[in-house]
């Protein structure tokens, strides 16, 4: 075909005027067109404009091993809510599970232990797929965080345990006087937050593990923490039961208060989850049923966007694709919602546990799957294979 004899950059420019449907038709014209149109470069603009394709707003590709063309196709199933829901694991007592995904290994906290399970592409029960077990807490694990080198867990026993992921080595230390509700780690820094109304800064440097660098009195129970990608600051989300703003940003080095976010929080509007998208942009959610998007360059007194959970229930957890999509977990009936940031209404809703009143305690996703944990079940939503 004449078109495909054009120089590559001209061809790319021509193709950039086509929408996905025309591209798909053209790709069927001949082998050469099929091959050229399978290239990621052809799909980048389209992929950036739709949800959860693994391209961030800055254009970074988080998932380069899978072709963008395929990810664009799966993205339409996310938009339409087409997926296959499966129970991956069930247990007998109600817990507050927390999950994290690392490639095809899912880490799940169940009571005092954290298990790592190998996920199979075709799905199926996880019972026999355990590949690692992390123990050491006397009470339930509240949260944990995976870094490239470590798994760091925070427990109801006040302990913080740093497990080396490459060996059996772990070190446990007394972090707080009461439950350690939340923990984050980036670079060499660990930040923990507790019911004891303090946040603490620790180092991950191997010869100083367990050494508390700073203790910050927050005068209110700390439910969530997140360290900025720039490492300079971190945010605490607190219970909002005292007269302190529930979202406060602190300087990691000097530990002074940098700023408070928002002004009009109701009493009890505690913040349960915080995620950074960039050093300036973050998402928060909690008991007041709103997801809020903050841009620190624009304003700290008001968020730049907000979305309200339509059933007026608290939001326990959020995740973002770092571009247009947010997934949130609500406090009743295992409701997971997908949001497109460009719309005020929720895009899709999945009621995973209609007969129990369990919250979604934790969720995570990649471009093809979403995993969500309620009190006694771990679910998988597969958007690539639909039934
Ligand atoms: C192209 O995009 C539209 C909406 O943007 C979607 O409905 C359609 O399924 C897409 N087609 C293909 C082949 O991806
Ligand atoms: C998402 O995770 C599942 C399970 O780990 C895996 O089978 C799948 O290949 C992953 N998808 C992508 C696009 O990485
Ligand atoms: C945690 O793991 C240990 C060691 O395998 C096991 O004995 C214990 O029963 C587990 N506890 C829970 C609550 O699963
Ligand atoms: C999207 O869903 C359809 C069913 O509606 C399914 O046939 C298709 O395989 C899914 N698309 C992808 C790319 O997985």
Image (tube, rainbow, N blue to C red):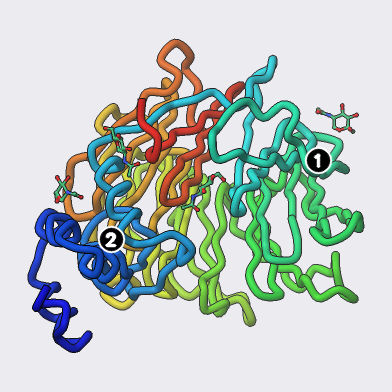
Residue pointed to by mark 1 = 157
Picture coordinates of residue 118 (x, y %)?
A: 68, 41
x, y percentage for residue 55?
36, 65
Q: Is residue 29 visible?
A: yes
- Dot 1 crowding, Cα within 10 Å, few <14, some 14–19, many 20+: many
Regarding mark 2 in the picture, which secondary structure is present there? loop
Q: Which residue is mark 2?
A: 303
- The CB of the residue at mark 2 lies under 8 Å from ligand 1: no
Please say if the residues under marks 1 and 2 sit with CB atoms less than 8 Å apart: no
**Measured from the top left, where is residue 261 in percent x and y?**
38, 63
> Going 67% across and 30% down the picture, which residue do you hit?
126
Which quadrant: the N terminus?
bottom left
Is label 1 in a helix, a strand or a loop? loop
Please report the residue visible at 53 percent of the width from the left and 74 percent of the height from the top: 233
Instruction: Give the quarter of the image for residue 211.
Output: bottom right
Q: Which mark is residue 289?
A: none
């Amino acid at each position: 075909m004449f078109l495909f004899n054009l120089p590559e950059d001209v061809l790319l420019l021509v193709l950039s005027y086509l929408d996905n449907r025309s591209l798909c038709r053209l790709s069927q014209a001949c082998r050469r067109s099929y091959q050229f149109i399978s290239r990621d470069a052809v799909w980048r603009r389209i992929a950036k404009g739709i949800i959860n394709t693994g391209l961030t707003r800055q254009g970074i590709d988080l998932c380069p091993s899978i072709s963008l063309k395929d990810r664009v196709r799966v993205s339409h199933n996310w938009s339409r809510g087409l997926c296959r829901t499966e129970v991956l694991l069930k247990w007998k007592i109600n817990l507050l599970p927390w999950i994290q995904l690392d490639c095809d290994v899912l880490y799940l906290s169940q009571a005092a232990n954290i298990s790592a399970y190998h996920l199979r592409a075709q799905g199926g029960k996880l019972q026999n797929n355990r590949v690692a077990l992390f123990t050491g807490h006397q009470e339930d694990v509240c949260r944990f965080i995976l870094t490239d080198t470590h798994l760091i867990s925070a427990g109801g026993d006040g302990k913080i345990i740093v497990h080396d992921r490459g060996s059996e080595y772990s070190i446990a230390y007394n972090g707080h006087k009461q439950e350690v509700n939340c923990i984050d780690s980036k670079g060499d820094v660990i930040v923990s937050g507790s019911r004891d109304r303090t946040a603490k800064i620790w180092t991950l440097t191997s010869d100083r593990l367990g050494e508390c660098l700073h203790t910050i009195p927050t005068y209110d129970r700390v439910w969530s923490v997140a360290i900025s990608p720039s490492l300079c600051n971190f945010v605490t989300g607190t219970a909002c039961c005292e007269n302190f703003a529930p979202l406060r940003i602190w300087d990691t080095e000097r530990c002074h208060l940098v700023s408070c976010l928002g002004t009009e929080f109701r009493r009890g509007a505690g913040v349960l989850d915080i995620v950074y998208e960039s050093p300036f942009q973050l998402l928060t959610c909690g008991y007041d049923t709103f997801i809020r998007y903050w841009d620190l360059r624009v304003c700290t007194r008001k968020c730049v966007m907000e979305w309200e959970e339509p059933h007026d229930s608290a939001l326990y957890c959020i995740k973002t694709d770092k571009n247009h999509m947010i997934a949130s977990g609500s406090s009743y009936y295992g409701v997971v919602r997908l949001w497109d940031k460009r719309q005020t209404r929720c895009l899709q809703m999945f009621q995973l546990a209609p007969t129990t009143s369990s919250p979604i305690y934790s969720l995570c996703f990649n471009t093809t799957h979403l995993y969500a944990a309620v009190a006694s079940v771990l679910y998988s939503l597969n958007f690539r294979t639909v039934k």
